Image (cartoon, grey):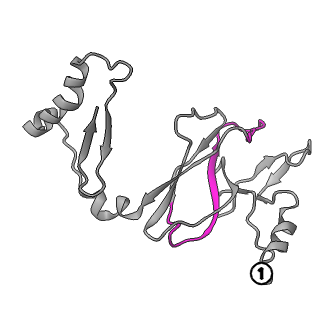
Amino acid sequence: MGRAPHSVGMGGRTDWLLLDAAQFPGYPAEFDAAVPQSMRGYSPPFFTALPESGLVQVWTGYFARSALGWSLLMRPPANIGPPGDVVTYKGIVESGVWFGPVFANLRLARKDEPVCLCTARPLLQLQPVQRHCYSDTAMHSMSLVPESEDLTSADWSDYATTIVQRSQSPPDTRGQTVSCQLNNATGEHLRTQ
């Protein structure tokens, strides 16, 4: 399956280039000067068209490695609304066993119009995640209750604590906020005033 072509303007050019893959201007020579001879010619592309229409991969300029047992969740930045012309896809890279460039997979929402990737706006956020958090055991250790009539008395008690009591309490004032900490040794929540 061939890649879907995209047009890009780079390096001050005013004309459009048909994109299959493009290197950042001058980077291949910089890469080749820094790597062992056997790796010359293998610099990561800056832009790559993906097979699906409207999808591109952009290299962040970073390489990633994490400790064994840890991975990186790549996601859109938290608490920042998405720009209207680019959508960042989420994904997990098992960077504890794989080393390589950090790419952002993007969907270009507008066609036949310029899309600006601004250096002042992050494309992606990396979040470390322990591999066991998304293991089959962890993913199958939860259950969903389809009807509220099926909730247990323990569920309703927890709901009363987290929602009802909090809604009935007067709002916290300065200096009276409650913080919650997790005791790493026991896994119990500790409340402090």
Question: x, y (%) of residue 89?
Answer: 56, 48
Magenta span of residues: 93-119
Identify which residue is drawn at 31% across, 17% down: 171
Identify which residue is drawn at 59% across, 35% down: 82
Residue placed farthest to the top in the image? Answer: 170
Please tell me in which quadrant of the rendered image residue 64 appears.
bottom right
Viewer-proximal residue, 181 or 159? 181
Please tell me in which quadrant of the rendered image residue 87 appears.
top right
Question: x, y (%) of residue 138?
Answer: 29, 59
Quarter occupied by the C terminus: top left
Viewer-proximal residue, 38 or 160? 160
Viewer-proximal residue, 106 or 124? 124
Up/down of 5 relative to 77, above or below: below
Up/down of 55 relative to 158, above or below: below
Badge 1 is on which residue? 36
Identify which residue is drawn at 84% across, 45% down: 9
Up/down of 84 relative to 93, above or below: above
Identify which residue is drawn at 85% across, 67% down: 30
Up/down of 75 relative to 81, above or below: below
Please tell me in which quadrant of the rendered image residue 144 appears.
top left
Instruction: Say if the magenta span includes residue 11.
Output: no
Question: x, y (%) of residue 189?
Answer: 25, 45
What secondary structure is found at the residue carrying circle 1? Answer: loop
Q: Please indicate, yes or no, whether residue 52 appears anywhere in the rendered image.
A: no
Q: Is residue 129 left or right of residue 103?
A: left
Q: Is residue 142 left or right of residue 47?
A: left
Q: Please indicate, yes or no, whether residue 63 appears anywhere in the rendered image.
A: yes
Principal SS element in the magenta part? Answer: loop
Check disc 1 and give the amino acid type.
Answer: Pro
Quarter occupied by the N terminus: bottom right
